[in-house]
Amino acid sequence: MDGQPARQDTEDSARSALGSTLRYLREKAGKSLSQLAEDTNYDKSYLYRLEAGERISKRPVMEDLDTYYETGDLLVRLWKLARMEVFKDQYKAFMRLESTATVMHMYTPVIPGLLQTEGFARVLLSLWPTQIDEEELEEQVVARMGRQELLHRKPRPTVRAIIDEAALRRAPADAKVWEEQLTHLIFSAAQPSITVQVLPFSVGVQPVPDGALSLLWQPDGSAVAYLEGSASGELLEEPDDFLKYRLAYDRIRDMALTPLESVTFIERILEEYRS
């Protein structure tokens, strides 16, 4: 396998650029795949598939290889670009704006991706109607977890997440995964830059979006709204469209439990689940 050429893509892509760079660095270092596997403790076939552009790793793998090749954060930066290709075009545009947003407000009928644990994300992504294999599932999980890095950048964005109570009542079959997810929500709500609110069933029928709604403000003051359904997304950049959905979000926030009440609510659900 050491002598096989990396896959040649018909078009330029960040994934193929990352793979080509990995192979270039290995050959420049005078290492075979077998030697690299022995030095790094990563499986040889896994390293080959990274070089061939057939897999997207988790970030720690790129950090390890950056250290091994003494390339600073070159591979990590290429990896950030490569993981963007996992998402569809509309979502890519949204993520680019999300990555630079200073303020983020969201309403979601499910646990928002930015606040999901890896275990819960894996459960959700595995339930999609479209059949995907284990490798594709892992790539989707890696991409979703990679998004959460923006929560830790400096300065940190101000995030407000309003979660429908329905999302907190649909527990996965794995008890440990659900307990970890609820605990993570409580932990997240305790962070100074993150506010979590619950929209309870008790408010009754309300004119809320069918899917998820995100409002993003940029450093220059510009703002966009993003509507995400089960199979598509729409980015709304016109001021009139944004205002419409900002007002809709404000109504949802007014109906939701306060941040303190919301944390108490989630803690109560966690205790009920444990009992």
Image: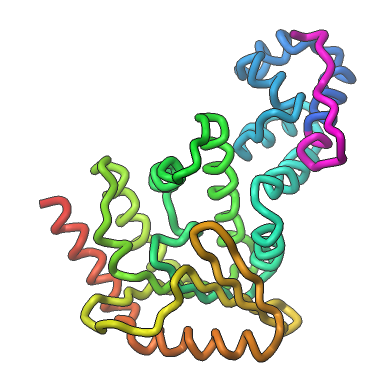
Query: Number of marks in the image?
Result: 0
Q: Where is 230 relative to 200, above or below?
A: above
Q: Which residues are magenta?
A: 1-18
Outermost residue to the left: 275
Residue 15 placed where, x, y %?
76, 38
Q: Is residue 43 left or right of residue 272?
A: right
Q: Residue at x 66, y 91 (%)?
A: 240
Q: Is residue 162 left or right of residue 10?
A: left
Q: Residue at x 42, y 89 (%)?
A: 251
Q: Residue at x 29, y 69 (%)?
A: 165
Residue 66 placed where, x, y %?
74, 33
Q: Work out whether residue 9 or residue 271 is closer to the camera in this orientation and state it.
A: 9
Quadrant of the image occupied by residue 68: top right
**Residue 10 in magenta?**
yes
Quadrant of the image occupied by residue 195: bottom left
Q: Work out whether residue 222 or residue 40 is closer to the camera in this orientation and state it.
A: 222
Residue 20 placed where, x, y %?
84, 29
